[in-house]
Image (cartoon, helix red, strand yellow):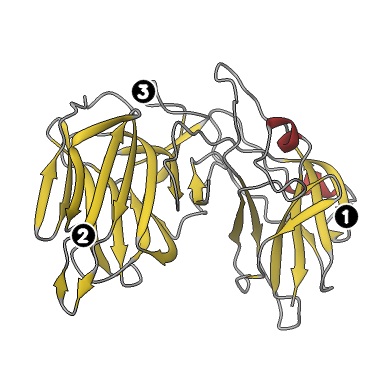
Amino acid sequence: MNILFMDGGELGTNELWDYRGKAITAGAVAAGFTGNFYYTGGPGLGKAITARDSVYLMCRFQGGDSRAVFYIHGNSGNNEECHLSKSGNNLQFSYYYGSWDGNIILQDSQVYRIEMYWLRNTWTGGTPNNDGALTVKVNGVIDTGLTKTNVRTDASNFSADYISFGNNFSYVDDCIIVADEWPGNLRIQALWPDTDDVTSWDCSTGSDHANLVDEAVTVGEVFTAVDAEYNYTNVVDEEETYTMSDLTEGTNPIDTIAAVQVSVRCKQEGTATPQQIQVIARHGTTSGYSSSLSVEQDSWSYRSNVFGLNPATSAAWTPAEVNAMKAGMRSKT
């Protein structure tokens, strides 16, 4: 599964998003959300992606009439191409020139796992060819009212490059963007640095590298970064990795791992190199590296990469392999 991005608020912060209109809330507003946190309030959450002509989306959603589930944007996020929202007790897909209503009934007080496949129609000159497609699932069941082929699915001639989840007064969790297949019944769990592994970087204080960055959260707490505690380097190509906390199954056994997303909170100071990082996921002695990612000057922000396959096996991760994983970063020019 080629996951492009995922977040369920389990870091206790909304900083993984490019637009952060929703706030983190601890607990669950109703049965159906997963983990310790979900998103509520505000006009939504937005994430830029590499422009593409089709996409699969998933989230757990609760909301009343006119509450949005997904927005798809084009033209660097400046054009709203289409959106899926709740209209009365049904879902409704809308674009500028039309809309379709779903058949499945949704109650305002219930949480639903909603998935959507969207294929943009092609254009000839300024004319849409009406060859797009749409499918929506609610708790894994296809909504036949929102199953369309050979239709127009966008407002203008742009590929999707920005995805939004939710709007005012809707609740969302487990927000996932996938390139190539249905997400299915996925849930997101956060793992935190546990012990030192490769410690080439320096500590801001003391000598326990992992302890400086293990900002784990518990139910009822909202993440507050301790910016005075960090690991740092002024040397290019130095690695810093940690063993991670183990997966917890709870009442939901973990059958498969869809992907591992490693996120690093970082900033860059001064004008000398290094000014970029690579995100690392390691199993055994084999490491997977992201591309080099620019780091913001004098401002803390997240840099992430999704590792869909175990770099040591070139196959899907297993729960045991995730529990044995090391994660971290490498400084780059």
Residue at image point 35% right, 71% down? 76
Relative to 126, is 17 on the left or the right? right
Whether residue 43 is visible here, answered yes or no, is no
> Which residue is label 1 attached to?
199
Farthest residue toward the top? Answer: 251
Q: Is residue 237 visible?
A: yes
| Mark 1 residue crowding within 10 angstroms, few (<14) / some (14–19) / many (20+) | some
Relative vertical location of residue 97 with respect to residue 113 in this rendering, above or below: below
Q: Are marks 2 and 1 in contact (CB under 8 Å)?
A: no
Query: Label 3 amino acid?
Result: Ala
Residue occupying the far left of the picture:
97
Residue ID for mark 2: 131
Mark 2 lies on a secondary structure that is: loop
- Please report whichever mark, 3 or 2, sits nearer to the chain's N-terminal start: 3
Front residue of 14 and 142: 142
Relative to 56, is 143 above or below? above
Task: Between residue 127 and residue 238, name the one nearer to us.
Answer: 127
Horizontal arrangement in the rendering, residue 315 relative to residue 235 (left or right): left
Residue drawn at the location 51% of the way across and 54% of the way down: 15
Circle 2: residue type: Asp
Q: Which residue is mark 3?
A: 30
In front of the other: label 3 or label 2? 2
Q: Residues within 10 Å of mark 3 (few under 14, many from 20)?
A: few
Q: Is residue 186 above or below residue 193?
A: above
Residue placed most toward the observer, 107 or 137: 137
